[in-house]
Image (tube, helix red, strand yellow):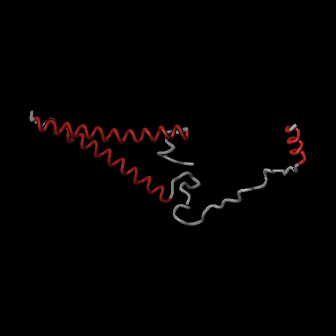
């Protein structure tokens, strides 16, 4: 009986029509001016503004770090070869060799992680390293 009463009340209540054309949220307007309001990628797909600057700085840092690690590896290898059996010099050279390999491994791993995240999120391994539209 309660079910029939509830069902009867819902039938008698006026129904408000909902249309997809109405916009209950309103219109979102993009901000004009300011540092972050400028688009980071232009119509041709190239980076612009602060994003391009940060991308160039990061590339320079990675290239410098890779070159520094490689040169440090060569120098420490030379130190190991010229140690002449001195255990202190050999251990110091091995430390530098280990640290150089570790630094190069960190650089390679960062690019590998960026590629994996790019594949998972964008289905493109270079989406993070070389963003475009």
In percent of width and height, residue 93 lies at: 18, 38
Q: Which residue is drawn at 49% across and 46% down?
A: 130
Query: Considering the image in quadrants, where does the N terminus appear?
Result: top right
Horizontal placement of 68 versus 39: left or right?
A: left
| Residue at the outermost front position | 1
Q: Residue at x 16, y 39 (%)?
A: 92
In percent of width and height, residue 69 lies at: 28, 43
Residue 85 found in image quarter:
top left
Residue 9 found in image quarter:
top right
In percent of width and height, residue 34 lies at: 54, 66
Q: Which residue is drawn at 51% across and 57% down?
A: 48
Viewer-closest of 82 and 116 = 116
| Residue at the outermost bottom position | 33
Q: In this view, does 46 lie above or below 82?
A: below
Horizontal placement of 8 versus 23: left or right?
A: right
Residue 72 found in image quarter:
top left
Viewer-closest of 78 and 88 = 88
Q: Which residue is drawn at 51% across and 43% down?
A: 127
In percent of width and height, residue 106 lies at: 35, 41
Figure disc tally: 0
Q: In this view, does 125 lie above or below 44?
A: above
């Amino acid at each position: 009986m309660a079910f029939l009463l509830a069902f009867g009340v819902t039938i008698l209540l006026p129904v408000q029509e909902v249309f997809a054309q109405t916009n209950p949220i309103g219109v979102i307007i993009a901000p004009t001016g300011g540092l972050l309001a400028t688009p980071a990628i232009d119509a041709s797909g190239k980076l612009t503004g602060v994003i391009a600057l940060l991308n160039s700085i990061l590339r320079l840092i990675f290239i410098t770090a890779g070159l520094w690690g490689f040169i440090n590896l060569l120098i420490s290898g030379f130190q190991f070869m010229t140690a002449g059996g001195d255990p202190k010099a050999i251990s110091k050279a091995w430390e530098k060799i280990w640290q150089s390999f570790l630094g190069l491994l960190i650089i390679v791993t960062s690019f590998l992680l960026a590629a994996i995240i790019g594949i998972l999120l964008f289905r493109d391994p270079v989406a993070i390293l070389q963003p475009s539209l």
